[in-house]
Image (spheres, rainbow, N blue to C red):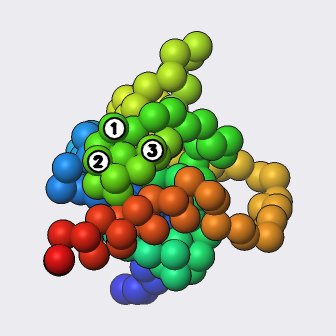
Amino acid sequence: MKRIAAKIKKKVLIEYLYLDLQSCERCMSTDKVLDSVVELLRPVLDAAGYRIEYRKILVEDEASAEAYRFLSSPTILLNGEDVFGDILENDCGCCSTISGTDVKCRAFLDGDKLVDAPSKAMLINAILKKLYETSPKQEKPYVLPENLKNFFEGKRSKKGSNLK
């Protein structure tokens, strides 16, 4: 009897980058939706020859933001590319409270409405579209956005003032 070689599955790396999962409603809501979507997609992508690797990454400071080329919170990457592409932002009361400064965080376009967290359908479609996209990735030089600089500086200042 001949042995059939097991097919080697292509790896799909899904990374969830965020600023806070303790008090930021936007990050926590997106986290829950993404957890659900990964579990829904896992058997489908497995059947299509893909193996999902899923990571959650707390972006704690400028160095980690630069390492991941982080532009806004929350961000979902598929094999290193943002699944939603364009960055839209609006005021984030939670992150403003965390940092003690005005902060805008990631928002998502659902039809013609701006929402703080993507729905399951939005996220499934974005991941599948990015997975099967054939256009080449275009690397742009990374510059830490002012909004994130302000967040991290404010968070450090607020933490320092709490120690006094």
At label 3, the amino acid type is Asp
Q: Is residue 80 visible?
A: no
- The numbered mark at residue 20 is none
Q: Determine the CA span between mark 3 and mark 2.
A: 8 Å
At label 1, the amino acid type is Gly
**According to the image, label 3 marks what residue?**
102
Dividing the image into 4 quarters, which one contains the C terminus?
bottom left
Q: Is residue 138 visible?
A: yes
Q: Residue at x 55, y 37 (%)?
A: 89
Task: Answer whether labels 3 and 2 touch (C-beta < 8 Å).
Answer: no
Mark 3 and mark 2 lie on one chain; the one further toward the N terminus is: 2
- Horizontal side of 54 relative to 11 (left or right) equals left
| Residue 40 location (% of width, % of height) | 30, 44
Q: Residue at x 59, y 76 (%)?
A: 66
**According to the image, label 2 marks what residue?**
97
Above-or-below relation of 96 to 98:
above
Q: Nearer the viewer, residue 120 or 2?
A: 120
Task: Answer whether labels 1 and 2 touch (C-beta < 8 Å).
Answer: yes
Name of the residue lying farthest toward the front: 164
Q: Determine the CA span between mark 1 and mark 2.
A: 6 Å
What is the count of numbered marks? 3
Q: Residue at x 17, y 77 (%)?
A: 163
Q: Regarding mark 1 in the picture, which secondary structure is present there?
A: helix
Residue 15: image quadrant is bottom left
- The numbered mark at residue 93 is 1
At label 2, the amino acid type is Thr
